[in-house]
């Protein structure tokens, strides 16, 4: 059973969103369910700082020993930071997907209405 932190929001494509209170900046990553399905992650491609992202559009890629999967931005906005540690330590996505495995910080221009609560995401992945 995958762990689903209750303080995050989720997408049906298995990304998570963490919003810092009133800052307008969110941190995104892939869920425990996604990393488990992918297997051992060996490479991560992230967007560049300053890139404009659109909710639902591809913003990166994760390569595992099983497959290559696209990462979809759950929100629209501008990339403020990327987790550069993932370039040298992509396995952090496996070991700590909600902590050290965060991928991108985005300054919001829009928050989609279709994000899932932890309970809804847990039901989706049950």
Image (cartoon, helix red, strand yellow):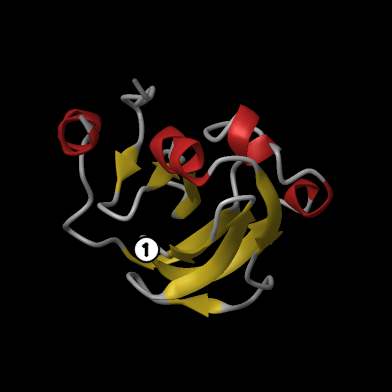
Residue 92: % across, % down: 68, 36
Q: Where on the picture, by quarter, is residue 96? A: top right
- Above or below, comparing residue 48 to residue 44 in the picture: below
Q: Which residue is mark 1?
A: 75
**Depth check, front residue: 43 or 54:** 43
- The quadrant of the rendering that contains the N terminus is top left
Residue 38: % across, % down: 51, 46
Per the image, label 1 sits on a secondary structure element best described as loop
> Residue most toward the right?
88
- The quadrant of the rendering that contains the C terminus is top left
Q: Is residue 45 left or right of residue 9?
A: right
Q: How many marks?
A: 1
Residue 101: % across, % down: 62, 39
Q: Where on the picture, by quarter, is residue 97? A: top right
What crowding class fits label 1: few (fewer than 14 Cα within 10 Å), some (14-19), or many (20 or more)?
many
Picture residue at 71% right of the left edge, 56% below the top: 43
Picture residue at 78% right of the left edge, 55% below the top: 87
Residue 26: % across, % down: 47, 51
């Amino acid at each position: 059973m995958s762990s689903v932190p209750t303080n995050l929001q989720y997408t049906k494509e298995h990304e998570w969103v963490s919003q810092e209170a009133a800052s307008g900046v969110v941190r995104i990553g892939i869920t425990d369910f996604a990393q488990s399905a992918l297997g051992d992650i060996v490479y991560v491609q992230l967007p560049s700082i300053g890139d404009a992202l659109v909710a639902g559009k591809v913003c990166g890629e994760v390569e595992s020993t099983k497959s290559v999967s696209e990462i979809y931005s759950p929100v629209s906005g501008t990339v403020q930071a990327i987790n550069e540690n993932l370039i040298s330590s992509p396995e952090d996505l496996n070991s700590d997907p909600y902590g050290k495995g965060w991928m991108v910080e985005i300054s919001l221009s829009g928050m989609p209405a279709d994000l899932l609560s932890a309970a809804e995401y847990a039901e989706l992945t049950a």
